[in-house]
Amino acid sequence: MAEDPASLFCPLEFRYGRERVRALFSRGARLQRALQVEAALAAAEAELGMIPKDAAEAIARAAASGQVRLERVDELESSLKHDVMAIARALAEAAGPAGRWVHYGATSADITDTALALELKESATILATDLADLERSLEELARRHRATPEIGRTHGQHGVPLTFGYKMAVAAAEVARHRRRLAEIVPRLAVGKMAGAVGTGAGFGDRAAEVEAGVMRRLELTADEAPTQIVGRDRIAEFTNFLALVSSSAERLATEVRNLQRTEIAEVQEPFDEARQVGSSTMAQKRNPMASENVTSLSRLVRAFALPPMENMVQWHERDLANSANERIVLPHAILLTDDLLGKLTEVFRGLKVDPARMAEEISRSAGGAMSEQLMLALTARGIARAEAHEILRTLTRDLAEGPSLADRAKAHPEVRRLFEPAEIDRLLDPAGYVRAAAEKTDRILARLERERGP
């Protein structure tokens, strides 16, 4: 029977998150991964002659058959008050006489942490694709606008010109660093354990190392080389802090869109469905950067999820249960929301409306002041002390908005006029030099990113 939408509680169930990640963390999927680990354990033990081969086969069939149902697991857990024991008993029931060998030698964390490793490995694959998609959308904008002049801004004020393509190339390089970070983290993250009660493997006897190796080989994981009863939580803390880094980059890019879409700047606009979309319930003219604002909001929540895993690294002796409850909440939420916000941000940049004419207007509005650096450096090269040259330009650029332009002021200044012809001053105050440098550097960044990805 379908759940009544009005009864849904968590916004992730109906408002945020994409189906592929929601499915990954569904209760059914999580149960199936635990059963997969139990089946791998039985198979590894049968291979070593520790349990009968036909028992391992029966356990594998029961694990894959769909006979172990959530309803039965829940029923057992309600009386046992132990989730893994409920799964093991439900699997043993489904396996018939072979059920006596289910969970042989293992402890609960062997199952839960190894199943979690499968979950995190698959999550990392999804996030790697997300990052690659975002990177490509930024690279496309960088190529298209490699030579599109735009004013650079520092402290919210006009700086010197760059190109919009360079801004996008910088963003693409940042996303590429996250993609590389994730690749570096995965080997430390896709780690399980089958080492018993306090991590020594004593329950498996002399074959402990072989059992663990057999389980991990079947699941395509590696074993934690030094576990306690649980896999070291520094691994998870590293991953959630990585998600926090990604979310910070996402918010940085979303904030850039939001600022450039401000009415008084209006250099870009995120996609807006003019036929149907509504920006405001009362101000019909509004075209709000709602997707970028949503990315900003979710990014802040992802960063908040980085703290509990840091605290979970602190365990009482070989383990306690203080990490367990919050991990069930933190990891699915943080991963689902990171996937969600990366997907939204990619769509923003794929459909971003860029206004080169408005960007050119903003450079012109500086009345030449944005190019003052070039004239200052040229004065220094002609023999004026840099501090003196700086003071000349600081004085010349005072109240530029009131006119005349910096070029006219420079041509009228005795010291500048003595050293430069009017045409030289015009050339020095032409933004073309900045645009050319930005376009060339954009090309170098894009070429490097392409080389790193390979064919």
Image (cartoon, grey):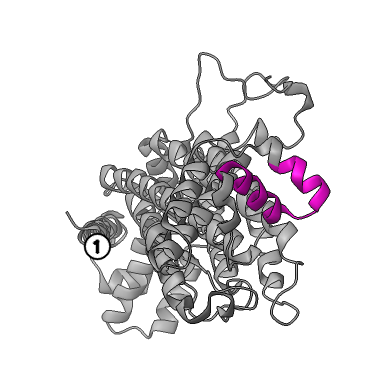
In the image, which residues are magenta?
73-95
- Pick whichever, 123 or 119, lies toward us: 119
- Pick whichever, 262 or 422, lies toward us: 262
Check the image and name the residue furthest to the left: 455
- Residue 94 painted magenta: yes
Q: Quadrant of residue 233?
A: bottom right
Q: Quadrant of the C terminus?
A: bottom left
Q: Is residue 323 left or right of residue 295?
A: right
Q: Secondary structure at mark 1?
A: helix
Residue 221 visible, this orientation = no
Check the image and name the residue furthest to the top: 275
Q: Residue at x 32, y 80 (%)?
A: 380
Q: Is residue 30 left or right of residue 167?
A: right
Question: Where does the image place residue 255, in percent across and percent down from the top left?
Answer: 56, 49
Check the image and name the residue furthest to the right: 79
Question: Where does the image place residue 286, in percent across and percent down from the top left?
Answer: 62, 25
Number of numbered discs on residues: 1
Q: Is residue 29 above or below residue 370?
A: above
Q: Is residue 237 above or below residue 280?
A: below
Question: Where does the image place residue 204, in percent across and percent down from the top left?
Answer: 53, 75
User: In the image, what residue type sits under mark 1?
Assistant: Glu
- Residue 84 painted magenta: yes
Q: Is residue 323 left or right of residue 144?
A: right
- Pick whichever, 341 or 291, lies toward us: 341
Q: Is residue 168 left or right of residue 100?
A: left
Q: Residue at x 58, y 68 (%)?
A: 105
Question: Where does the image place residue 178, in percent across and percent down from the top left?
Answer: 43, 61
Q: Report the residue marked by disc 1.
A: 452
Q: Quadrant of the N terminus?
A: top right
- Looking at the magenta stretch, what is its main secondary structure? helix
